[in-house]
Structures are given as C-alpha cells and as structure tokens.
Image (tube, helix red, strand yellow):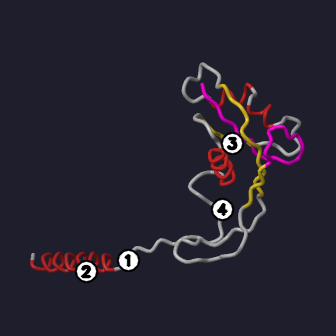
Amino acid sequence: MKGYLAIFAVLIVVYFLNLTDAASKPLVIERKKRSFKSYFENYFDEMATSACVAMGSKRGLYFAVRRKCGSFASCKEICTSYTIRRQAQIWDPSKLLHSSCVESLHIYKNRPSLADNKKADTDVNKVGLTIYRYKTCNSRGCGPNYCCCTGLP
C-alpha cells in the first residue's frame, strides 16, 4: 500500500510541476509572413466586397460579383440580371431583389505579398495589393473582374 501512495504522491508532484511550468511560458502565436490568406475563402472577393461597400452612398445590400475577362455582359447587365437578383435576395427568397450597379473594379491578383506588420513596421514604402476603379458600369472588355452591386427588396 505504501508503494502505491508513494507513486501517487510522485504523480501529484509531477502534475503540479507541469502546471506551474506551463503557466510560466507565454503563449506564442506564430503568424505567417507574406500570405494572402485570411479567415475567409477568397481574399480577392473580400477585397472587392469591402471596396464596394465603401463606395456605396445609400442604404441596402452591397455585394461583389465576379466577372470573367472578355465577358460580353457589362456590370450593369450582370447586377440587374435575374440570376444575381435571385442569389442576392437574403430577406425574402420568394421575391427578387431590386438591384443596380455601383461600380466596376479590377483586383490585380499577381501583386507582391507584404510581410505582416502587426508587431513591427515591415515592408514600408512598398506597393502591395492594388485595385483599379473604372467609374463606370458599362465596360464590356477584358477590364473589370468584379462588379459592385447594390439592392433593396
């Protein structure tokens, strides 16, 4: 019986030593440098949606819609299409959203990724991500790769 008590006492001491040792070490979270990763699926969609919302001037939903290079449809036509109006309706799926185009954008995808600057001023005076604003919803060429749309039910 004494042998079991001795083993049990040793286990308790080791357990408490591990607790105090773990508590004395600060938790270090590694952050990866030079990455377009975020908490969401596609960083470029996030950039486009954020830019669209920032350019908006009235209340309503704002959303970015991907546009294929060389598409014959303008952003005005894409934003007001039946398919987009149906997909964007989040309040009452039985009704179509009354949507319109706000802007067309080109998100440049082959830009350098700058280092994380949360703890230090890294990669200062360097150009990273870039967005071109067309100031029109009527472009049909291989320019805009995102359409900024808005709508109300």
Q: Residues within 10 Å of mark 1 (few under 14, many from 20)?
A: few
Q: Position of residue 75 (x, y in %)?
A: 79, 37
What label sits on residue 64 in the rendered view? 3
State the residue position of label 1: 26
Highlighted magenta segment, given as a residue range: 134-153
What label sits on residue 36 in the rendered view? 4
What label sits on residue 14 in the rendered view? none
* 56 to the left or right of 76: left
Disc 4 or disc 1, which is closer to the eye? 4
Based on the displayed image, in which of its 4 quarters is residue 66 positioned? top right
Circle 2 SS class: helix
User: Which residue occupies 16% across, 78% down?
Assistant: 9
Q: Which of marks 4 and 1 is nearer the N terminus?
A: 1
- Report the predominant secondary structure element of the magenta stretch: loop
Cα–Cα gap, marks 2 and 3: 54 Å
Name the residue nearer the viewer: 136 or 2: 136
